[in-house]
Image (spheres, grey):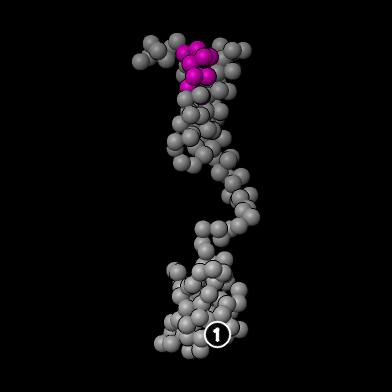
Amino acid sequence: MSDYLTHLQWWHWIVFAVLLAAAEAVVPGAVMIWFAAAAAVIGLLLIVIPIPWQWQLIGFAVLGGCALVAYRNYRRKNPEKFEQPNLNQRGVQYVGHELVLIEPIEQGSGKARVGDSVWKVSGPELPAGARVRVIGVDGTILTVVPA
């Protein structure tokens, strides 16, 4: 193993960088790509300056770790903003909307029409046809109050 390490060349690092970048497609989270970038930097640096293998490995570890920490800090300070933050939470999308009951709310539950579907609702006793406003969601049950 040490014989291989003593003969590390620039193209070894470039191949390693490509393999790490390909692994990023399989591994969740942005981790491998930063180490791929570090390997590419070491490979490109070796074209210009001959560096002992020990310093190559140390440089790879330090560059990859620093890049990963810098990325995580950047993401913490600048979280992604989505156009539809509640896209996969259908019930939350209806909070604030007014609906019409198609079944009365009796003993705390009833049904209301939401677009072209029917949802269970919970709230105070109300007759069918009453207008209600969605104030919350509990799983797939909309919490409503009289509108």
Judge whether residue 38 is colored magenta.
Answer: no
Numbered circles on residues, count: 1
Residue 63 in picture, x, y percent from top left: 55, 30
In the current view of this chain or complex, which residue is farthest to the left?
1
**Front residue of this view, candidates 65 and 141:** 141
In reply to whether residue 16 is colored magenta, the answer given is: yes
The kind of secondary structure element at disc 1 is loop
- Residue at (53% x, 14% y) in the render: 10
**Quick check: 92 above or below 144?**
above
Magenta segment's dominant SS is helix
Q: Is residue 99 in view from this perspective?
A: yes
- On the image, which quarter does residue 45 sit in? top right
Q: Position of residue 144 (x, y in %)?
A: 53, 80
Question: Which amino acid lies under the numbered mark 1 shown in the image of this protein?
Answer: Gly
Q: Which span is picked out in magenta?
A: 8-17
Task: In this rendered view, identify the residue nearer to me: 136 or 61.
Answer: 136
Residue 51 percent coordinates (x, y)? 54, 14
Residue visible at 47% across and 85% down in the picture: 105
Closest to the observer: 124 or 82? Answer: 124
Residue found 45% across the figure and 81% down from its top: 110
The residue that appears at 37% across and 14% down in the rendered structure is 2
Q: Nearer the viewer, residue 36 or 89?
A: 89
| Whole-percent x, y for residue 97 in the image | 60, 74
Q: Residue furthest front?
A: 116
Up/down of 65 relative to 87, above or below: above
Q: Assess disc 1: are there few (<14), some (14-19) or many (≥20) residues with their C-alpha within 10 Å of its C-alpha.
A: few
Q: Is residue 124 visible?
A: no
Residue labelled with disc 1: 129
Quadrant location of the C terminus? bottom right
The N terminus: image quadrant: top left
Q: Is residue 105 above or below residue 12?
A: below
